[in-house]
Image (cartoon, grey):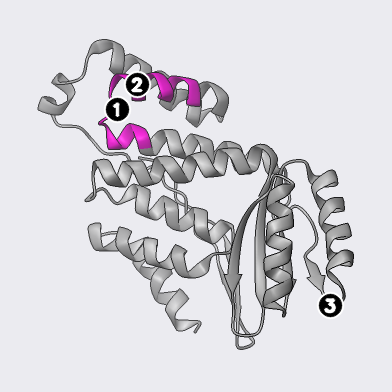
Amino acid sequence: MKLQLPTIIIVCLSVVLILTIHFWGGRDFQTIEEGNEESAEFRSIRIDANNAYIAKDYYNAIELYDQAYEMRPDNAEICNDLGSAHYDLAIKNAGPLWPSWKDITVNGSVEDAITELELAIEKIESGYFRIKTSSTSIAKDLEKIAVTKGAAVFPYYGNTQTTLNLLIGPTKEHLLQAKSLYLRSIELKSVYPAPYRNLGSLYMKIGITDKAINFYREAYKRQPSDEELAEYLHQFKSAF
């Protein structure tokens, strides 16, 4: 199983918590009985997909995982791994910067914000950026406009500020696909911790902290031996 737990910077009550936790790997080892249930063709495709993923050849990995998933649409692990390939390709397509553009802070009119929004979409092409405003009504207007321009918008409502987290281009397409696949993996095998943790990483990456922590907690419930995740949750809680 593939897991992501990203670097985050959390600012709360003037306390800055910097947590850098990177976790890759953590594969499930199949029993002999489980392995025997898989065809030689399926196992071969899965091995090739894993090798492509390790080599960061995400397009090829996605194609191979898709083939394996078509053969075993009931396999939660393959579904999760396919989601991880989409996730990593989304981040790769965003380029070296995350966010991909300077934060847009709306202090004036909606018209000024729209101009900055259009400029960001034009220049970024694929990636993630944020619009921040203290006006809920302006945030809602900008959300509608951003959607009409092809962005996926994830609003985060704070006590004094609303942040619109926006995804555009291939980054948007692949992250939304990853999200859908992780959720499907949970449907297929609700006791499997990897997709919960990966959804936590995805939501943390796009600034939806509350959902991220909820998914991390669900992952930990299913794998309480995960000391790294336990420490992460502990440090996050202590920051607030």
* Sequence-wise first label, 3 or 1: 1
* Viewer can see residue 9: no
| Residue identifier under label 3 | 107
Region in magenta: 62-79
Pointer 3 local density, CA inside 10 Å: few below 14, some 14–19, many at least 20: few
Left/right of residue 55 with respect to residue 72 in the rendered view = right
Residue 151 x, y percent position in the rendering: 68, 48
Q: Quadrant of the N terminus?
A: top left
Q: Nearer the viewer, mark 3 or mark 1?
A: 3
The residue positioned 53% from the left and 61% from the top of the image is 204
* Residue 75 counted in the magenta span: yes
Indicate whether 43 appears above or below 227: above
Residue 73: assigned label:
1
Depth check, front residue: 117 or 9: 117
Specify the farthest residue to the left.
Answer: 33
Indicate whether 187 appears above or below 12: above
Left/right of residue 83 with respect to residue 158 in the rendered view = left
Distance from disc 3 to disc 2, alpha carbons, whole Å, reads 50 Å
State the SS at label 1: loop
* Sequence-wise first label, 3 or 2: 2
Depth check, front residue: 30 or 39: 39
The residue positioned 83% from the left and 68% from the top of the image is 110
State if disc 2 and disc 1 touch (CB < 8 Å). yes
Residue 70: assigned label:
2
